[in-house]
């Protein structure tokens, strides 16, 4: 497949070669990985180390790489910031900007491992960061298992917010209720789905979940998301509770955790009372 980002990468490398401020450029993500490689919808993910990061934050350097249509900044891992741009109509380029010191810390603290474990390519390296990559980044994608304390906390958190969301629906606060049901609770549900599938190659943030999750879980998920409608939100909340309970009980049994059955029963009673209201 033709590399849609070839011109942008070439301009970036030329810029780095001409400007001592830029110390490293690393391509990560779909453009360099072999598992689920890039397709026509893929973006270009980069880690860039610069002594002075301000020109990346101001947009001066990104503007040298092509015609920027959309651009903004958001916080990212390792204490850095990420400049995200759309070049032309649809070329999505995400640039994690580190100082050299932050990049070195990212390698040593394991932050780089999290984003580089599926592959990386140095496009430019003025300070031998490739040696740090060889030392600290391995192609191991296993995530550390959840501890019993983390499990207990997330289960109680989930069931607490079952009741919280139901109360918001009863009060008529649709926005708050829906955001809890289809955002907050779903992040907790996803963590349990990941733990339930700990024997699979689980991707972060639910990516490719339709490939690694089992058929029953995927079927139940179809009933867990709601329209902006009270009855639909109530049904989605009940379905989300049911799926979470099934999977968390299975995870507890598998790992030897104490499952907070009291919390589960408390939330279930309230949802039953809510359904009759």
Image: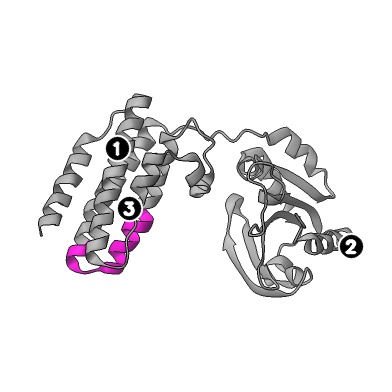
In-image side of 1 versus 146 (left or right)? right
Left or right of 196? Residue 135 is right
Q: In the rendered image of this protein, does residue 201 appear above or below residue 7?
A: above
Is residue 74 visible from the viewing direction of this image?
yes
Query: Residue 219: x, y in percent?
Result: 36, 46
The mark found on residue 224 in the picture is 3
**Mark drawn on residue 18:** 2
Please rate how many residues cluster around mark 2, counting C-alpha atoms within 10 Å: few if below 14, some from 14 to 19, many from 20: few
Report if residue 96 is visible in the image: no
Task: Give the dominant element type of the magenta stretch: helix, strand or loop.
Answer: helix
- Which tag, 2 or 1, sits closer to the chain's start? 2
Q: Which mark is residue 112?
A: none
Residue at image coords 75%, 50%: 26
Give the magenta part as a residue range: 168-184
Q: Residue 122: x, y in percent?
A: 79, 47
Question: Mark 1 — residue?
Answer: 246
Q: Magenta stretch containing residue 192, yes or no?
A: no
Q: Residue at x 70, y 55 (%)?
A: 46
Residue 53 position within the rendered picture, expressed as x and y whole percent measured from the top left: 71, 62
Q: Secondary structure at mark 3?
A: loop
Residue 177: in magenta span? yes
Which residue is nearer to you in this view: 35 or 186?
35
Determine the secondary structure under disc 1. Answer: helix
The total of numbered circles placed on residues is: 3
Q: Secondary structure at mark 2?
A: helix
* Label located before the other in sequence (3 or 2): 2
In this view, which residue lies farthest toward the right? Answer: 18
Image location of residue 7, percent across then percent down: 81, 64
- Camera-near label (3 vs 2) is 3
At x 75%, y 54%, the residue is 1
């Amino acid at each position: 497949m033709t590399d849609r980002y070839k011109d942008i990468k070439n301009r970036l490398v030329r810029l780095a070669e001409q400007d001592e401020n830029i110390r490293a450029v690393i391509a990560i993500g779909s453009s360099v990985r072999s598992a689920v490689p890039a397709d026509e919808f893929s973006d270009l993910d980069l880690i860039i180390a610069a002594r002075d990061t301000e020109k990346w934050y101001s947009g001066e350097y990104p503007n040298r790489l092509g015609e920027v249509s959309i651009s903004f900044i958001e916080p990212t891992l390792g204490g850095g910031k990420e400049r995200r741009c759309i070049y032309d109509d649809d070329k999505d380029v995400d640039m994690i900007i580190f100082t050299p010191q932050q990049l070195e810390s990212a390698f040593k603290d394991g932050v780089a491992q999290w984003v580089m474990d599926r592959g990386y390519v140095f496009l430019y390296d003025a300070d031998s960061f490739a040696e740090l990559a060889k030392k600290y980044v391995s192609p191991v994608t296993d995530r550390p298992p959840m501890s019993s304390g983390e499990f207990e906390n997330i289960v109680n958190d989930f069931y607490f917010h079952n009741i919280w969301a139901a109360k918001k629906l009863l009060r008529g606060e649709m926005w708050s209720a829906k955001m809890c049901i289809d955002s907050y609770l779903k992040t907790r549900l996803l963590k349990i789905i990941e733990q339930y599938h700990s024997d699979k190659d689980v991707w972060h943030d639910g990516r490719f979940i339709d490939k690694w999750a089992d058929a029953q879980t995927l079927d139940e998920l179809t009933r867990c998301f709601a329209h902006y409608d009270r009855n639909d939100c109530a049904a989605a909340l009940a379905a989300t509770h049911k799926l979470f309970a099934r999977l968390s009980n299975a995870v507890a049994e598998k790992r030897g955790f104490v499952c907070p059955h009291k919390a589960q029963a408390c939330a279930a009673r309230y949802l039953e009372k809510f359904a009759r209201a």
